[in-house]
Amino acid sequence: MIDCFTTDNGIRVIYETLPHFNSVSIGLWFGIGSAYEGKKDNGITHFIEHLLFKGTEKRSPRQIAVEVDAIGGQINAFTAKEYTCLYCKLLDEHIELGFDILSDMVINSLFDEAEIAKEKGVILEEICMYEDSPEDLVYENLAKNYFLNHPLALPIIGRTQNIRAFTRKQIVDFYHSYFTPNNLVISVAGKFNKERLKDLINKYFASWNVKGKQPVKKKVKDTGTGISYNKKDIEQIHLSFAFPGVELKSEAFYPSQVLNSILGGSMSSRLFQKVREDKGLVYSIYSFSLAYMAGGMFVISTSMKTDHITEVLKIVIEELETLRNKGISETELTMAKDHLKGNYIMGLESADSRMTALGMNKLLLDYVSSPAETIKKINDVSLAQVSSCIDMIFGAKKYTVSTVSSNDMTEEISNLFKESNYL
């Protein structure tokens, strides 16, 4: 059963009891991420996420890790474009320790100067790691060039110059502005007593009365076009294409997911079958739909030897032309729906996946669909809705391309698009 309540200090709590489980997952979801940063403080949310593990008034960094490991639990965190999550998973008998540690980390973190200095080094190494990965680099460049001046264009991890420049005061001020009860959703899923859950949240969070401010939320007004190139001494060329996508709240959300499954979101998809299975030109080719509150982006990604690029792009362009001119079949629609439903249901078979679904949807949408409601939304997708999605995503002939390779192939790619008379 899914239920929710709001504490006196403004924390929204959503939970689902799963009595047949032996574990419980707890997530603290803050409505702050890189999409609410500016160029000068880009990366600060992710930095704070790291610093929450670096000691509190009661616990050293090592004690946080040891206490969780000692009971066979897991604790971690991640920062996204529109939210930050701190979570733990443990046996149900240890639920109180989970709340004790998580509350201590978000309420009593020290933000020690020495730890800040050390963690700058860690994050600078993390940036280097991403820059060494062509898959990550091609996507970061794609987002930057597609979202233009919107904060969604900024990297979650931040820029090197920002990380080096952050001061303790800047970090603490940002933290107390946005990591606050009124900007927090606590999601819990697994085996627990709901009355005890309320007592525990009261015990560990009721005295936390910091008043913060809501982050400024901007809609994506315009998107970029063109081809960008990043030089890297690698064997393949990595390409990502961005097309207009849908917002998270859009009625086209589920039709876009169906379209994605058909085009490149599964092993039976058109692109995977024709480019990899039939022709053997690539190891990987796929599509995905990124839906944010502020806007969206539909992406096709692949990598290959440079001498395969002409043949691969011709197939991709032909498939997009076929989609626009002929649409999809009833058989494809049915298969895509079944694919989505299967993935969705199997994705709910763990406490942490249910905790994630609860927290993310409550935070972003202030509403959580039941499994039956979600299945119905997928089942209700029609051919006409998918056709409208195709027109919206590919009909405008507006695209952004990001490439990473040892040689600049911008001219070749541009000429292929021009010859196709499509892109």
Image: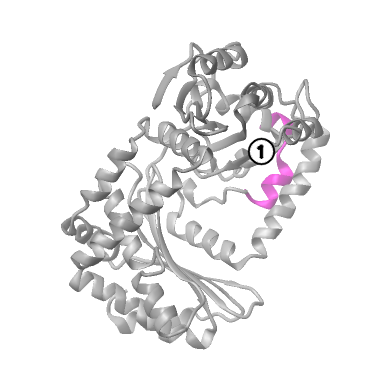
| Residue 118 located left or right of residue 282 | right
| Residue 237 located left or right of residue 311 | right
Residue 262 visible in this rendered orientation of the protein? yes
| Residue 170 located left or right of residue 116 | left
Front position in the image: 354 or 346: 346
Residue at image point 49% right, 35% down: 355
Residue at image point 46% right, 22% down: 12
Q: Position of residue 332 (x, y in %)?
A: 25, 66
| Residue 259 located left or right of residue 149 | left
Find the residue positioned furthest to the right: 114
Q: Position of residue 145 (x, y in %)?
A: 47, 60
**Residue placed under numbered mark 1 in the picture:** 74
State the image quarter where residue 265 is shown: bottom left
Identify the magenta region: 158-170
Please name the amino acid that badge 1 sits on: Gln
Is residue 41 within the magenta segment?
Answer: no
What secondary structure predominates along the stretch shown in magenta?
helix
Q: Position of residue 109 (x, y in %)?
A: 71, 26
Residue at image point 64% right, 23% down: 103
**Quadrant of the snapshot with the N terminus:** top left
Q: Position of residue 223 (x, y in %)?
A: 38, 56
Front position in the image: 20 or 145: 20
Residue 291 visible in this rendered orientation of the protein? no
